Amino acid sequence: MSQRETGHVKWFNEKKGFGFIINQHGDDIFVHYKDIQGVGFKTLHENDPVTFVLDKGPKGLKAQDVALVSDAGRVE
């Protein structure tokens, strides 16, 4: 399960620090702010395109190593 996947942000609550990503298969994937790449304040916005590593946590599917994808298809 360590292969990178693509998807987009379904929703993300900045105050609570978590949300969900929808992968290319339509699955809801939990995402926590600690698993977003970058420094400083980490957040995601609805419909942001992302890549991530899919993991299976105790409560279901979880995204790790989440990276935003630019309009040109480059990982930011």
Image (spheres, rainbow, N blue to C red):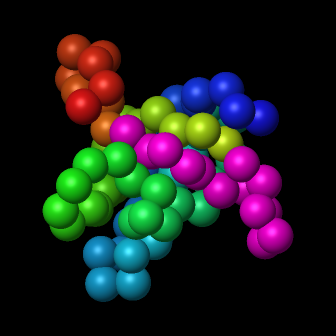
| Quarter location, residue 53 | top right
From the viewer's perspective, tell me whether residue 57 is left or right of residue 33: right
From the viewer's perspective, tell me whether residue 13 is left or right of residue 62: left
Residue 10 appears in the picture as rendered: no
In the rendered image, the quadrant that contains the N terminus is top right
Is 38 situated above or below 31? above
Residue 59 lies within the magenta run: yes
Q: Residue at x 31, y 26 (%)?
A: 75
In the rendered image, the quadrant that contains the C terminus is top left
Seen from the viewer's position, the closer of residues 3 and 69 is 3
Percent coordinates x, y for residue 49 in the rendering: 37, 36
Q: How many marks?
A: 0
| Quarter location, residue 61 | bottom right
Q: Which residues are magenta?
A: 55-67
Q: Residue furthest bottom?
A: 15
Residue 55 appears in the picture as rendered: yes
Q: Residue at x 27, y 62 (%)?
A: 42
Percent coordinates x, y for residue 34 in the rendering: 43, 64
Q: Residue at x 67, y 26 (%)?
A: 3
**What predominant SS class does the magenta segment belong to?**
strand
Q: Residue at x 22, y 55 (%)?
A: 39
